[in-house]
Image (cartoon, grey):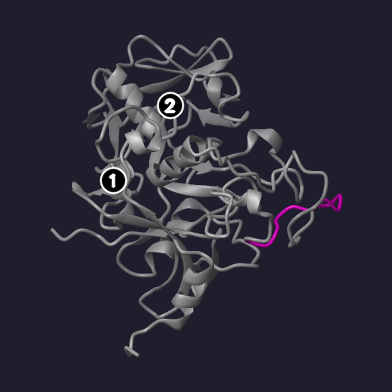
Amino acid sequence: MPANFDLSNLALKALAPSNEILYDDKGQPSFMVKIPKMTYAQLGLGASTAVHPAFIVNGQEVDAIYISKYQNIVYDGRAYSLPGEEPKHTINFDTARAACEAKGAGWHLMTRAEWAMLAQWCKNNGTMPKGNNNYGKDTSESNYKAIPMAKDGSNNITRVATGTGPLAWSHDGTPSGIWDLNGNVNEWVGGIRTVKGELQILANNNAADSENSQAASSAQWKAIDASDGSLITPDGNGTTTGSIKMDWTSSHLQYDTTISDSAPGSHNCSFEAITCSANISAAAQLLLQALGLFKYDSNAGAYGGDYFYFNNAESERSFVCGGGWGDGAGAGVFCCNGHYGRTSTGGSLGFRSAYVELPSA
């Protein structure tokens, strides 16, 4: 038998073929799910055979991404994906990111590009996951299905133990899936923010490489040109000419190149209510769809009632995804919340790490 034969991984793969135990640079394990490279067409985003942005890091394609099977805990300043644990909470964006990056090269806070790719996969395959979005159970369930780990002042269940819900709480409905993408705790994601309502991202999945700074002042942040979907240098004030911005009109989010909102601030609407003005080109819309920020399917109810939250007044806002234990039908894989600053903390704010083998220069 080879000396490096990993019996733990062999046992895991016997039960969950797409799962692997990955070890950080201190030899500590995390349960991960391997997601192979996919194109827009394979994800149900049109006919393009171009690779989804989640699989492009520093201008090069990667063969796979490894996503934490479970919402993470933190031990000794490092993030870990383990079953049956209370997920880490009351953690801000930069601390969550640091706990992931401390594990070694390729480890990172799950990015918006990765989250959106998974959400679209679930929708395209008819496996939109349920989860702890109604105090220990899903809104569609009548019984508690997961192990409680915390309660609120009214004795309602809040956080539950990672991976202890039914199979319907897995992203693919099988034991091999990724758990708790719907509810439990909201999850910080990297590579996306708003500045006074202007949408800004890191190119493709460059946020997967910790060498690409996500600091507030980083030059890696780019606005999106509404005319063609290309990335442009923002002006620093959220007023970049021709960039995609989040406007509020007729009680819903509309992407446009200017903000006409008479009372800018925190707003929310259903994901499927979001629209684009005529100023947003087809190419720019496709990028928004690839990032899970705009619907591709116009059929009523296609996104399960998931909600979208944003703030178009503050100097910077970061994003969390999935919803929390009390968000009801508004939680889910297309639930996205841009109300929070990078220093925000709270009992419903957690995170998930991911890993990619970084391409060589």
Which residue occupies 22% across, 49% down?
A: 61
As drawn, is 290 to the left or to the right of 250?
left
Which residue occupies 73% across, 58% down?
A: 146
The front one of 254 and 162 is: 162
Q: Are marks 2 and 1 in contact (CB under 8 Å)?
A: no
Mark 1 lies on a secondary structure that is loop
Packing grade of label 1 (10 A; few <14, some 14-19, many >=20) is few
Task: Give the x, y percent position of residue 231.
Answer: 24, 31
Amino acid type of the residue tagged 2 in the rendering: Gly
Amino acid type of the residue tagged 1 in the rendering: Ser
The front one of 173 and 260 is: 173
Which residue occupies 40% across, 11% down?
A: 277
In the image, residue 202 sits, relative to residue 346, either above or below, namely above
Is 271 magenta? The answer is no
Q: Which residues, given as a range, are shown in magenta?
A: 152-162
Packing grade of label 2 (10 A; few <14, some 14-19, many >=20) is many
| Real-space Cα separation, disc 2 to disc 1, in angstroms | 18 Å
- Where does the C terminus fall, quadrant-wise? bottom left
User: Which residue is tagged 1?
Assistant: 218
Mark yes or no: residue 103 visible.
Answer: yes
Quarter of the image for residue 219 reads: top left
Task: Give the x, y percent position of residue 202.
Answer: 30, 42
Quarter of the image for residue 24 reads: bottom left
Which residue occupies 43% across, 33% down?
A: 315
Is 158 magenta? The answer is yes
User: Which residue is tagged 2?
Assistant: 197
- Where does the N terminus fall, quadrant-wise? bottom left
The front one of 355 and 336 is: 355
Mark yes or no: residue 346 visible.
Answer: no
**Helix, strand or loop for the magenta stretch, by majority:** loop
Mark 2 lies on a secondary structure that is loop
Quarter of the image for residue 141 reads: top right
